[in-house]
């Protein structure tokens, strides 16, 4: 009879975020901000061969994916009813529709969180 080890999902998320932090500080901070504001963990796994990790969070019909492949951050991908796109593009579009012409001056994580929490996005 083989033994299948159990994995504590909180330990996996913590490990992924600790591994992501030196590779993409803003993405790790943003993931922590989403988790602290109640986003649900849909998937979290890693490491697997070639230093691959993935974390997917959800709130309503919006999904946010964080990943690492070969030790490099994949960036942040947002999936929403209209499709999927990098977080930067979502933030830029959101800021433009609200007359914010310099969204880079707003702390990235806070702006991104506001972007994703607005019902019309």
Image (cartoon, grey):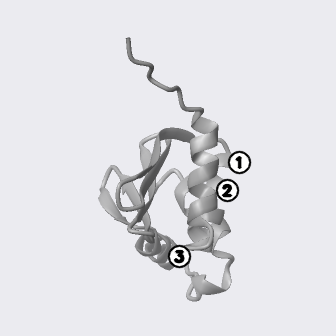
Secondary-structure class at tag 3: helix
- Taking 1 as reference, is 109 above or below it? below
Q: Is residue 114 visible?
A: no
Q: Earlier in the sequence, mark 3 or mark 2?
A: 2
Q: Residue at (43%, 49%) from the top-left corner?
A: 63
Secondary-structure class at tag 1: helix
Q: Residue 24, percent across and down?
A: 56, 73
Quadrant into which the C terminus falls = bottom left
**Residue toward you, 54 or 59:** 54
**Residue toward you, 77 or 113:** 77
Q: Nearer the viewer, mark 3 or mark 2?
A: 2
51 with respect to 18 (left or right): left
Q: Residue 21, percent across and down?
A: 62, 67
Q: Gap in Å between the C-alphas at discs 1 and 3? A: 23 Å
Q: Residue 81, percent across and down?
A: 33, 49
Q: Residue at (61%, 73%) from the top-left corner?
A: 22
Q: Badge 3: few (under 14), some or many (20 or more) residues near its Cα, within 10 Å?
A: some
Identify the image quadrant of residue 52.
bottom left
Quadrant into which the N terminus falls = top left
The mark found on residue 36 in the picture is 1
Q: Looking at this view, name the residue that lies furthest to the front.
A: 1
Instruction: Read off the residue under disc 3.
Output: 95
Q: Gap in Å between the C-alphas at discs 3 and 2? A: 19 Å
Instruction: Read off the residue under disc 2.
Output: 33
- Taking 69 as reference, is 35 above or below it? above
Q: Residue 42, percent across and down?
A: 46, 38
Q: Residue at (55%, 81%) from the top-left corner?
A: 99
- Tag 3–tag 2 contact (CB < 8 Å): no
**Residue toward you, 38 or 8:** 8
Secondary-structure class at tag 2: helix
- Tag 1–tag 2 contact (CB < 8 Å): yes
Q: Residue at (67%, 56%) from the top-left corner?
A: 33
């Amino acid at each position: 009879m083989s033994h299948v080890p159990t994995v504590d999902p909180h330990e996996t998320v913590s490990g992924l975020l600790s591994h992501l932090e030196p590779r993409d500080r803003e993405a790790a901070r943003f993931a922590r901000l989403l988790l602290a504001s109640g986003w649900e963990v849909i998937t979290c796994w890693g490491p697997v061969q070639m230093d691959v990790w993935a974390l997917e969070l959800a709130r309503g019909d919006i999904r946010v994916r964080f990943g690492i492949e070969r030790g490099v951050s994949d960036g942040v991908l947002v999936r929403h009813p209209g499709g999927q796109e990098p977080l930067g593009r979502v933030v830029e579009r959101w800021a433009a529709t609200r007359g914010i012409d310099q969204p880079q001056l707003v702390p990235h994580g806070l702006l991104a969180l506001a972007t994703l929490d607005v019902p019309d996005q």
